[in-house]
Amino acid sequence: DESLILDLDKHQFLAPVLAQLVAGRRASDPLFDLPPGQLTKTLARCGSLLGLKPPPLPYQLRHSGPSIDFADQSRDLVSIKGRGRWRSDSSLRRYEKGAQGTKQLRGL
């Protein structure tokens, strides 16, 4: 039973898309039913089309969002910790570092 609150303005475009995805499904049905490795293959294909080398990997999806949220001050570390279900504060230090890098990249 997983849920994710779309509480920021930048995420509002997702609401109608997700509503279409869940239409006609039971609450117990998975939203995405991908065979093992399919997400990695799809990201690699998209990365190739975009000329990204190396291609993005699934774990980067979990970690880039918190870094961006911290960098653009959408969320504080306490909110990021709760949203990501991290138990220790040491897990959050990477987002402070990642946020610094994101700020520098946005300045280019």
Image (tube, rainbow, N blue to C red):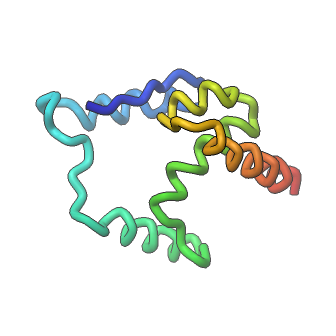
- Percent of width and height locating residue 34: 24, 58
Instruction: Please name whichever residue, 75 or 105, is drawn nearer the observer in this view of the structure.
Output: 75
Q: Is residue 61 left or right of residue 69?
A: left
Q: Is residue 25 left or right of residue 40?
A: left
| Quarter of the image that includes the C terminus | bottom right
- Percent of width and height locating residue 101: 79, 54
Residue 46 visible in image = yes
Residue at (51% x, 27% y) in the render: 12
Instruction: Please name whichever residue, 56 or 46, is drawn nearer the observer in this view of the structure.
Output: 56
- Relative to 4, residue 106 above or below: below
Q: Quadrant of residue 22?
A: top left
Residue 24 visible in image = no
- Relative to 14, residue 55 above or below: below
- Percent of width and height locating residue 33: 21, 52
Q: Is residue 36 left or right of residue 100?
A: left
- Relative to 105, residue 17 above or below: above
Q: Quadrant of residue 4?
A: top left
Q: Quadrant of residue 76?
A: top right
| Quarter of the image that includes the N terminus | top left
Residue at (51% x, 76% y) in the render: 48
- Percent of width and height locating residue 70: 71, 36
